[in-house]
Amino acid sequence: MNVSVVLFTSDLRLHDHPPLRAALDGARQVVPLFVRDRAVESAGFAAPNRLAFLADCLRDLDAGLRERGGRLIVRSGDLVAEVCRTAAEADADEVHIAADVSAYAQRREERLRHALEAEGVRLHVHGTVTTAVDPGALAPASSDHFAVFTPYFRHWSRERLRDTLGAPRTVPVPEGVGSQEPPTRKGLSGLSPRLATGGETAGRERLTAWLRSGLAAYEDRHDDLAGDATSRLSPHLHFGTLSPVELVHRARAAGGPGAEAFVRQVAWRDFHRQVLAARPDAASADYRTKHDRWRTERTAGDDIEAWATGRTGYPVVDAAMRQLREEGWMHNRGRLLTASFLAKTLYVDWRIGARHFLELLVDGDMANNQLNWQWMAGTGTDSRPNRVLNPVTQAKRYDPQGVYVRRWVPELADMPGPAVHEPWKLRELDRTALDYPPPIVELADGLARFKRARGRD
């Protein structure tokens, strides 16, 4: 065989890339292809922050390929039509692609397979590209997937991961295959001011630095809101500029409790992807415990607006929501707190919160985002669906001196220490001077409403 196409999707890297390695091993020339899928962009999944990060990733991928004698072919339109057109232009025999789990990705793969077969081109789908363990590799005897994380993690931990692949030295690309210029951030509006830089180069630099200076303390500090001691690698995992297989291997090689805690988080990501692969409708439908009495925009519009803009009157919730808007990213503990507050304290439909997160999160992943929201809403895989996180208690535990709150809520910058978490306790004159809203709901009232609603379900 002479030419193969490698279709990049959410695997925008050269290191540890099984589809690219297989194509190079089996063909004289390779067409590295990325299609700007109009169906994805028109469906609202391509939020400005993710489009900007994607542009960084594609330009970096193109630069890496050019260093190896190749280039990235960029097309726009219907993905299936563009892949078939590219394969015909290059006279390719095969197309290689990484497996994915969303309902749209599964339908797209099936469409692509049929269209290529009609043209005499074979489609190869590769696993363990976007996950450490394939979504369908593990299942209990009684089901097609694990619905509880702990037994899943036991099985996941016993799996032998494949070896990591190095980046290719050369990538010979045939002449004459047309391409658009890789996109740039220029002209994109609505970007978070402190949005991180995308691309494999940036991702590998961040990974190396974090393994050296952050991993060892991860177990003790990953919930430290002010310390910002998480890896911040989630955008690179979402776009595939880093390999989850490589992350697990390198963390385990470093060793220690921090490595174990970090690997567990990679397993959580795989867990959610195997749930979504088996139950694609969980992206929008209650996975386990169904509820039909959520408050919505019609009945809770003001509360939703206060939550989205960081004006709930609960400083730690507001700080996290403002970090999201400013960075396109949020600390994991903040994600748990803001989701619990919206879905349980305000009893607002989790889908409203999940949609807002997807509008801003650079790592907005359909599996992780939707299923983490379901976890906090009590409709998903949580074995304690009625747990409610108290934002004041949580703030005092994970931001004891209020450093995180003061970083993101400047109205409270002059409040000392842990007092910043309860500004409503100030004298009325002092509260007025703060220009900060009172709580939009009493926590006791929110908890009582939640219990009443759930008690009838």
Image (tube, helix red, strand yellow):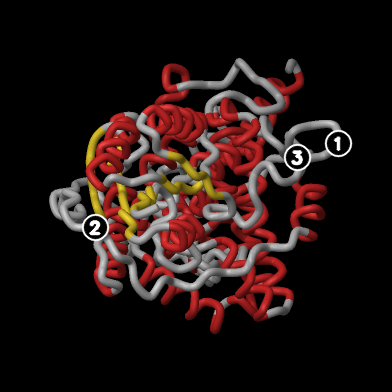
The local secondary structure at tag 1 comes to loop
Mark 3 vs mark 1: give the one in front: 1
Q: CA distance from mark 3 to mark 2?
A: 44 Å
Q: Of the residues shown, which amino acid type is indicated by label 1? A: Ala
> Which residue was labeled with disc 2?
174
Q: Quadrant of residue 218?
A: bottom right
The residue sitting at 38% across, 45% down in the picture is 93
Q: Amino acid at mark 3?
A: Phe
**166 in relation to 337, above or below:** below
Do the residues under discs 3 and 1 have CB atoms within 8 angstroms? no
Can residue 412 be seen?
no
Q: Residue 24: image x %, image y %?
A: 42, 62
Q: Give the left or right position of residue 159, taking residue 216 as reference.
A: right
Q: Which mark is residue 141?
A: 1
Q: Which mark is residue 146?
A: 3
Residue occupying the point 36% across, 57% down: 327
